[in-house]
Image (cartoon, grey):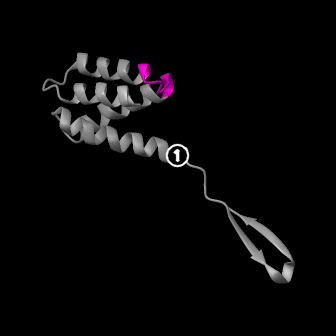
């Protein structure tokens, strides 16, 4: 995890954002075991959002990428399961 963070940090410290920058990001994500599907989704969405928001700097892209990763991961969260005890029913019931 720390290797991925350091490598991403180095990439986002670059001033020039071009096709090579996106290719480097893709490689970093793949080497960081993000997975092919997630990497392709993130890169595609990053390009789209960068264009829509007219993002030009690596700092702008860093903020956008963080939001995209957060959105991607939030879809994987499991809903919290709550156990509620009802004395009248003499037992627990599961509610999701």
Name the side, left or right, on which 75 lies relative to 94.
left
Which x, y percent locates residue 68? 38, 41
Residue drawn 36% across the image and 25% down it: 3
User: Split into 4 quadrants, where in the image is the C terminus?
Assistant: bottom right
Which x, y percent locates residue 29? 39, 24
Crowding near the residue tagged with mark 1, few <14, some 14–19, many ≥20 C-alpha atoms within 10 Å: few
| Residue 25 on the magenta segment | no
Name the side, left or right, on which 79 lies relative to 53.
right
Residue drawn 42% across the image and 19% down it: 31
Which x, y percent locates residue 77? 55, 48
| Residues shaded magenta | 30-37
Name the side, left or right, on which 45 lies relative to 21.
right
Q: Residue furthest front?
A: 2
Name the side, left or right, on which 31 lies relative to 81.
left
The quadrant in which residue 12 appears is top left
Mark 1 lies on a secondary structure that is loop
Pointer 1 residue: 75
The quadrant in which residue 26 appears is top left
Q: Residue furthest left?
A: 15
Question: 54 or 95, which lies in front?
Answer: 95
- Badge count: 1
Q: Residue furthest right?
A: 90
Which x, y percent locates residue 41? 43, 30
User: Split into 4 quadrants, where in the image is the N terminus?
Assistant: top left
């Amino acid at each position: 995890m720390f290797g991925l963070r350091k490598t991403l940090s180095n990439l986002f410290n670059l001033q020039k954002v071009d096709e090579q920058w996106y290719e480097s990001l893709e490689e970093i994500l793949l080497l960081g075991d993000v997975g092919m599907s997630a990497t392709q989704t993130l890169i595609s969405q990053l390009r789209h959002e960068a264009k829509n928001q007219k993002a030009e700097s690596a700092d702008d892209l860093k903020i956008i990428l963080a939001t995209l990763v957060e959105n991607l991961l939030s879809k994987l969260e499991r809903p919290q399961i709550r156990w509620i005890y009802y004395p009248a029913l003499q037992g627990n019931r599961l509610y999701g």
